Amino acid sequence: MSAMTVVLRRELAGYFATPVAYVFLVIFLVLSATFAFYLGGFFERAQADLAAFFSFHPWLYLFLVPALSMRLWAEERKSGTIELLMTLPVTLWQAVLGKFLAAWAFTALALALTFPMWLTVNYLGEPDNGAILTAYLGSLLMAGGFLAIGACISAATRNQIIAFILTVVACFGFLLAGFPLVLDLFAGWAPDALVEAVAALSFLTHYNALSRGVIEVRDLVFFALVIGVFLYANTIVLDMKKAS
Amino acid sequence: MIRTEALSRRYGPLLAVDTLSFEIAPGTVLGFLGPNGAGKSTTMKMLAGFISPSAGRALVGGHDVSREPLAVKRLIGYLPEGAPGYGEMTVAGFLGFVADLRGLRGPVRRQRLATVMDRLSLGGVATQTLETLSKGFRRRVGLAQAILHDPAILILDEPTDGLDPNQKHEVRELIREMAADKTIIISTHLLEEVDALCNRVMIIGHGRLLADDTPRRLEARSRYHNAVSLRLSDPAQLADAETALAALPGVAAVECDQQRLTVLPKDGVQILPSVAELARTAGWTLAELHLESGRLDEVFRRITMDTPA
């Protein structure tokens, strides 16, 4: 078993050793269903798809994922266990990847537990299951992007509340990067190329295509890049801040 | 086994460790002493590979800590200050986690886990979570974690801090047993611990090495070295005795602390025979008479107070 797997297993078991896992799962499942049925008008739409369900995921993640990621490193730094972990034979990357993958696996579990939605729509009609699978993939990738951002911010502080709030703000910025709310901050003074670059960072734009069942390589690459970049930043921040 | 070359560490404007160079041979039990903030923990953290030096380097078992951190970490068992652990894990789960990261497997893993649980009397709390343990137990879990892979080098940052006298005794016994085939560095504030355990003492202050010697020879630097300490049964004789002792040849000073008289010799003079002789001829009834080997706390205070900030 590699050092990364050992870290991953410990982290994942840690979720279930405290009420964190159960609170998260229950709230995620209840809210995702509630939003789909009430706000999304799942029945009223009378369409055999899960668009009403997936369209609320970005907003659910905006608050739930930071709650999951805030403790990843902040808690280790606060309790001093980071000194223990970093003096055991494990590399920075193994630790960062192990923790991130544990959190990501956990969100994957939460997502998998929404399967009754899928059963429901299959019972009621004949949906395009390929499109639904793509939407699940998109949702998982977006959660991974949020988690990587959150893990990086969590490494920069020893205070979980600060990590939570900063992550929500950062994720909100990334979600709406393609929309006037964020773009107006840049339009007018920044060169067009920069404005376009910011717009291209929009999680929502990339996710929307996937959630409609359209697999485009650039959307997959985008989320993979976001995860990679923030995990890399995570190792740098950790190396700089671990002792302070 | 361990060598540092002009090892330095800066935190912003503060120079926590200042060009520290030393060498530690196998089989050494080194006591690392110094006032709070002297740079003891920082030095240990650098040796253990937790923080990297700002300048200079540290070699552990021939490996540069900055270049080959994993090789060093495999060699070392490290107990960080305060013995941190994952609160939500059980003792058995936590030690199992460390065993996995240490690459212990199968029967070796089982045997090592059983050995350290037994050695540190953790059997009774194996299924308890770390956050429910007392300070003493938590420290023992930290020690168990450090010795789990039977490392050649042990670095223990205040291993007996917060333990009751019995637990302190147990931990010292454990360290003494392991000293036979390991290189051990312990930092401590307890001078009696150094006396009981270490065959070498390093005192540091403001990140610099102030003294490096055996506990015996450090004690010999004390002005109490070879002093004679006596207590009289009859307090009425105290004042007379003090004057008579001060008049003896070879006596530098006489200190009176409650009922106890401490006679300090001039450099290199053996005064015990003449003090004993005087006591006999003057007819004092002695409750106690002994030769002091020196007081480490006094030496420590003098060495660490003398240095300019």
Image (tube, rainbow, N blue to C red):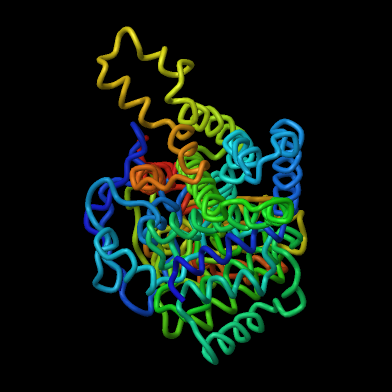
User: Which quadrant, please, contains the N terminus of chain B?
Assistant: bottom left
Location of residue A199 with respect to A158 vertically, above or below: above
Is residue B62 positioned above or below A23 on the image? below
Where is residue A47? Give x, y as percent: 66, 41
Q: Is B88 in front, or is A105?
A: A105
Q: How many marks?
A: 0
Residues A101 and B152: in front is A101
Q: Position of residue A137 (x, y in %)?
A: 50, 52
Quarter placement of the C terminus of chain B: top left
> How far across and down, in percent of the image, does residue A1 sit?
46, 76
Left or right: B41 in relation to B246: left
Image vertical order of residue B5 relative to residue B95, above or below: above
Quarter-of-image position of residue B233: bottom right
Residue A236 in the image: state x and y as whole percent: 35, 45
Which residue is pictured at 56% across the width and 71% down the height?
B97
Query: Residue at 63% of width from left, 50% of height from top?
Result: B256
Residue A234 visible in the snapshot: no
Q: Is residue A89 above or below residue B86?
A: below
Q: Is residue A207 visible?
A: yes
Q: Considering depth in this image, is B49 or B19 the residue closer to the camera?
A: B49
